[in-house]
Amino acid sequence: MTNEKILLVDDEQDILTFISYNLKKEGFEVLTALSGKEAIQIAQKEKPDLIVIDVMMPEMDGIETCHELRAIDELKDTLITFLSARSEDYSQVAGFDAGADDYIAKPIKPRLLVSKIKAILRRKNNVSEPLGELEIEVGNIKIDREKYLVYQDDNSFALPKKEFELLALLMSKPGKVFTREVILESIWGTDVVVGDRTIDVHIRKLREKLGDKHIETIKGVGYKLKLVE
């Protein structure tokens, strides 16, 4: 039995009750919130392992809620997934852009939902650090795997976990083209299905922070870190 803590966020009480029932049967501790503001308050107090958020909510929607959660330092590495009836590509991109780790489309059968949630949580419990040295330096970029910090020129900053792992992978072999399949398997694992645009969103975020010149797109194949002086 698990004792992992999950926070469910939805403005419809019957949905919260239904999902809570199925998760509690599997041994999860379940917290619920009927709004984004309530979710932020509960998350700060309870520090859940996973937050599951509906996109369409009044006042503060799921995207804005996710942005707010990611801005809280102690929650920046908390797993977040959307569970929404909006399955359009642009909605999923917006979700990942807000900092979500996954996006699950409704409708979904309870057993499959529980299975997906377990797979998402396995990322947190079984993620291994990339192989190699604790510090890597390529050109004007240096990463510290122990501190999860990136140094560029005279600046230092932290990255969300998946962005950091993606950068570490690319920096492990500068100039090597990493295929999309290798990136997905290395960063997200083989037992988790993520949206097709997940890699693109994370690459775009890295480019925004590091500059466009460092990561090159190889159309139809993948990405590589360019050697820039």
Image (tube, rainbow, N blue to C red):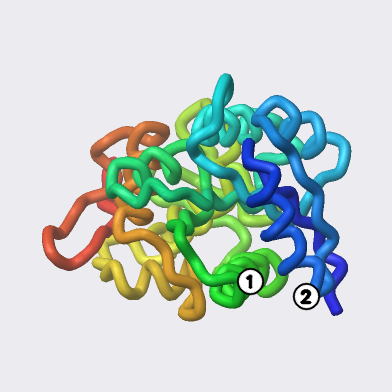
**Residue nearest the observer in this picture, 95 or 152:** 95
Between marks 1 and 2, how big is the CA–CA gap?
A: 8 Å
Most extreme residue toward the front is 14
Q: Is residue 118 above or below residue 155?
A: below
Q: Residue at x 57, y 20 (%)?
A: 59
Q: Residue at x 52, y 52 (%)?
A: 83
**Residue nearest the observer in this picture, 209 or 113:** 113
In this image, 169 relative to 9: left or right?
A: left
**Residue nearest the observer in this picture, 125 or 195:** 195
Residue 132 seen in the figure: no
- Residue matched to label 1: 114
x then y, percent, for residue 213:
24, 39
- Quick check: marks 1 and 2 in contact, CB under 8 Å? yes
The type of residue carrying mark 2 is Glu
Q: Which mark is residue 26?
A: 2
Q: Is residue 105 above or below residue 40?
A: below
